[in-house]
Image (cartoon, rainbow, N blue to C red):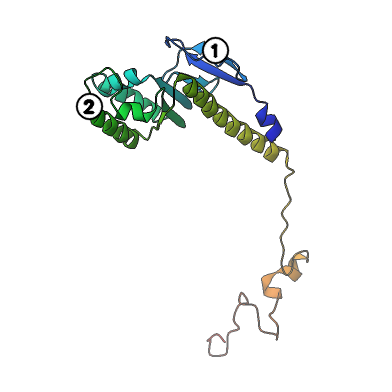
Amino acid sequence: MSDAVSKLVLRVVCDSREQQPYTFSGYPCTVETGTLASGDLTLHGFGSRIAIERKELGDLIGCLSYGRERFERELVRLRSYEFACVLVESPAHDLRSGCYRSQMDPVSAWQSILALQMRYRIPFIFCDDRSDAERTAFDILRHYARDRWRELQALKSAARMPVERTERRGPGVGMDRDGNAPERRQRAGGIPHPTTAPTATATGAGT
């Protein structure tokens, strides 16, 4: 199974509104263009289950300041996915050091990142640069596709397994109806089975 997984060729779908999309040149995948409901990258057939939102650092700062309301609406949509993340093409150090063209305070920007991750359960993944972000995006999609492929193989294996016949086990199985009836069986020592009806005495009381 591991060999087959390693040979998977991904079908990556890139949002048509992306101005600088990843080409994934040299990676074992094909790249298609489509209109995604959320995010910038996904896998073919899983557009409503996994999404990657790509951000340059300057774009991210804008989303944390004047474009925050719209950005949070996007995070709300992504929260319903099996997996979604915000992939940043710069290291966290650049954000925390204020290495961007904006008046937003670096401390406020960092605290916003922490708060949004907690509030919407969407991880923000900071990368070294654009090339590193492209590689990270591919790896995320690869891991997701691998897990779904393994789930599919497990379901196929389960469908091919013969249904095992279950048989009753215990005293009396296989006897004729009269011999197997509870009222015909007695415990060791001649004590009547609990289901045996009590014998009435002359006074009418049960023994």
- Could you say where residue 4 lies in the image, as x and y percent from the top left? 70, 30
Report the side of 11 relative to 87 (left or right). right
Q: Amino acid at mark 2?
A: Asp
Please determine whether, in this image, residue 1 is positioned above or below residue 13: below
* Residue for point 26% across, 22% down: 69
Residues 166 and 80: in front is 80
Q: Secondary structure at mark 1?
A: strand
Q: Nearer the viewer, mark 2 or mark 1?
A: 2
Residues 29 and 15: in front is 29
Please determine whether, in this image, residue 109 is positioned above or below residue 165: above
- Could you say where residue 22 lies in the image, as x and y percent from the top left? 50, 15
Residue 117 got which mark?
Answer: none
* Residue for point 71% across, 74% down: 184
- Could you say where residue 111 lies in the image, as x and y percent from the top left? 27, 34
> How far is the residue under mark 2 from the one under mark 1?
38 Å
- Could you say where residue 134 lies in the image, as x and y percent from the top left? 50, 21
Q: Secondary structure at mark 2?
A: loop
Residue behind mark 1: 32
Position of the C terminus, as image quadrant, is bottom right
* Residue for point 66% across, 29% down: 6
Q: Where is residue 81, by image quadrant?
A: top left
Q: Where is residue 19, by image quadrant?
A: top left
Residue behind mark 2: 105
Position of the N terminus, as image quadrant, is top right
> Are discs 2 and 1 less than 8 Å apart at CB?
no
Please determine whether, in this image, residue 34 is positioned above or below residue 167: above
Please determine whether, in this image, residue 182 is positioned above or below residue 39: below
How many residues crowd mark 1 within 10 Å: few (<14), some (14–19), many (20+)? some
Report the side of 113 relative to 46 (left or right). left
Of the two numbered discs 2 and 1 on the same chain, state the one appearing first in sequence. 1
Q: Amino acid at mark 1?
A: Glu
Q: Where is residue 10, by image quadrant?
A: top right
